[in-house]
Image (tube, coloured by chain):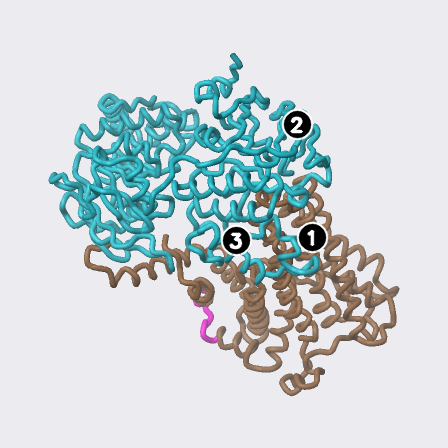
Chain colours: A brown, B cyan
Amino acid sequence: MDKLPRWADVALVPFVSLLLAAIVAAIVLLVIGQSPTEAFKVMVEGALLSSYGWGYTLYYTTSFIFTGLAVTVAFHASMFNIGGEGQAQLGGLGVALVCLALPWPHWSVALLAAALGGAAFGAAWAAIPAYLQAKRGSHIVITTIMFNYIAASLLVYMLVDVLRPAGQMDPATARFPEGTNLPTLNHIPGLNLLFPKDVPANVTLFVALAAAWAVWMLLWRTRLGYEIRAFGKSEPAARYAGINPTKIIMVSMLISGGLAGMMAINNVMGESERLVQNAAEGAGFIGIAVALMGRNHPVGVLLAALLFGFLYQGGAELGLWTSIPIEMRIVVQGLVILFTGALDMMVRMILTRVFALFRGRPAAQGAV
Amino acid sequence: MAQGVEMTGRPATAAPFAIELKGISKAFGPVQANKDINIAVPKGTIHGIIGENGAGKSTLMSILYGFYRADAGEIFIGGRLTPIPDSQSAIRAGIGMVFQHFKLVQNFTVLENVVLGAEEGALLNTSLAKARAELQRLSRDYELDVNPDALIEDLSVGHQQRVEILKALYRQADILILDEPTGVLTPDEADHLFRILKGLRDQGKTVILITHKLREIMEATDNVSVMRRGTMVGTVKTAETSPEALAELMVGRKVLLEVEKKPATPGAVVLDVQNLRVVDEHKVERLKGVSLQIRAGEILGIAGVAGNGQSELLAALGGITKATGAVTLKGEALPLTGKGANGRARREAGIGHIPEDRQALGLIMDFAAWENMAFGYHHRPQYGAGAVLMDNAAVRAETDKQMAAYDVRPPIASLAAKSFSGGNQQKIVVAREIESGPDLLLIGQPTRGVDIGAIEFIHKQIVALRDAGKAILLVSVELDEIMSLSDRILVMFDGQVMGERDPEITNERELGLLMAGMTG
């Protein structure tokens, strides 16, 4: 098989995949008697054509960057971390405990402490499956999935029996103290010109961007990242080179869990300002699709996270303004994941043929 | 250039051509794999195509079999212009291909494999019966005996190869292409294969034999075409040429088929191994108390049939597997278990290791050449100050230097290891391990799958390292290599050392007996 040129591999393949997903989504809409153009218009207007819409889109994007990066780091060590959801839930617990522990004097101090708390809890939740994989060979996919369920149950227990203030009905922590409230984009000087109204996107966005840069540095500019990638490509070769497999599995999964846990500063600390049940809302799973689509590269993750942020927000708008059921948002996400992830090879193969055809043309007649 | 070589790309025979390729070119990105190839293969001959790894032989055959499309050029089959856009067209044109790695379903019978993809109609029984009769005829005509009801997984490699040939013949191939067919065969099996090929030729079939082994070309072919760096440098009659002349054509200069070296001047003991034992994961003892010593400035060769503990010896000394016993390097004891027993600690102690399997161990195939140049040595201060950051620019600079010094082609540091030919991959590993400045170098199968030019180069490097006063442990299943490079030879059998021989005095027969476990 001939290879695709790099630009087609990086840009054209995802674009065609998205286009196919959009076409199938349009057919589904037609089948249920809705107008695809109307739906598309609502989604774009609701997510991208107002500062309000951007405020939500970027908020979701922030979460997805963290979970996408989490999957990416583990993936380079050939660990498929499906447990981002549970790690993000535990990160929420960590963030909540930090926020409730002290009357924090300023949000910046609180943010630093809460980020560390969330990362520590997320990492701790990833540590057990990682240890089992490294020492016992228990498959990381199975154990991390199981840990998602355990995390959900643990959170219910903590919220119902431990952290719920006396007299409160719903299973949630108390509201975090004032000093922990993060500035949203409309409260940041300069950005407030772009975002006049209250939006959920907050300073965590910049933490997420910094995290993406840090992951890039880690993987391609440090010795540890070199070892992680080498181990991920070939464990026997890594052993030959004296790279310690246990260390790489543990470290990569701890970083991965830590990144997933840090997501909680966006949704728990930045948005809801208390910990509620199922706070992660599936962002951990979206992270898998984001990493897949972003080719496990931080830049790709940023772009894919933005796309899924748009789908999330646009989908919510559909539920608000049209009679299209909100479940349609899940259908669209599913199609995007299907085409960009599972059917990626199909698109690639077709495009490869098309490119080969164009290249074959200048050759002499009867050429092969 | 050797004399008496016709440079037209056409053999002197005037018979009609089974295959004629005209002006075939193919590029992969910056690499021009085939450049204006012209070749004509007369009907009813065995035609060898020889060239070093990476010369473009496999690419050319892949074009002929429809795996790649040529950028330019024409294919004539039996005198007719025949475009081959895919392998189905190739099969229709009467071309059959036997790949280096067989494409057989392991848990199907021979008969089922032969029929697979060529079934006629919905019911299997009719095609199976037809194939059975046809197989009987083929095996009678061509000495291709295989039990049609045997499962592939129960067959030896040589028999599996016959099934591949039968598959092609069953599809009525008139032209049979074999890609490096003897790489996996024992000498006996290879001889049988050549008899089969000659039988096919005598029945009017055309055989194209791709190889990089001169001996096989001389033994089995009628005409031979030589490729070098993507171009066809000449076609000659086999009877009118010699291995030396072919080697020169392949490499483009005179090649020493023998190793030149001075007598060794051994110094102090560098490596001392006492009673080394290795137990594998199935609790089988693979190394049963091996003791040996290597001095500075000598090459100790380990001869033996593959699988008699040589791999475990290398792995234990290289820190890849745990072992028991006592090993000292320059008088210092090396830990054989626990935290200190790993590849990194061994490298820091001064042991370099060219592993037996460069693709599985020695290189990360997806990594760029420059990333591989630091592999195992990526902690060294020269590749970045401090413990955290890696100085990619320093690694690249070192890679450019080594690629020039070791003549790695193409000298592109950013190219992935998998894009290099076997010989050039090996040069990357050899450069890395020798230039790291080891006191002891472990070498496993240094020239497996490596072409002649690179073999000569690698052998020179090994001898130069010895002459620089380093200790070398050489493991190879090629007796020629062991005998020509070693200063002392140990023979291993069943995890034990059977005896030591002096390469100046011993002969292949004596070593062969020891390799078979006979001490008499």
Task: State the image quarter where residue B282 is shown.
Answer: top right
Element type at mark 2: strand
- On screen, residue A127 versus residue B15, left or right, reads right
Q: Find the residue positioned furthest to the bottom.
A: A193
Residue bearing the label numbered 2: B276
Check disc 3 and give the amino acid type.
Answer: Phe
Check disc 1 and give the amino acid type.
Answer: Val
Front residue of this view, candidates B208 and A302: B208
Q: Which badge, 2 or 3, is on the more N-terminal residue? A: 2
Q: Position of residue B225 (x, y in %)?
A: 25, 42
**Comparing marks 1 and 2, which lies closer to the viewer?**
2
Is A228 rendered above or below residue B295? below
Element type at mark 1: helix
Point out which mark residue B367 bears: 3
- On screen, residue B50 versus residue A104, left or right, reads left
Q: Are marks 2 and 3 on the same chain?
A: yes
Q: Position of residue B302 (x, y in %)?
A: 54, 28
Which chain does tag 3 point to? Answer: B
Cα–Cα gap, marks 1 and 3: 21 Å
Residue bearing the label numbered 1: A251
Residue at the location (55% across, 52% down)? B373
Q: Residues within 10 Å of mark 2 (few under 14, many from 20)?
A: many
Check disc 2 and give the amino acid type.
Answer: Leu
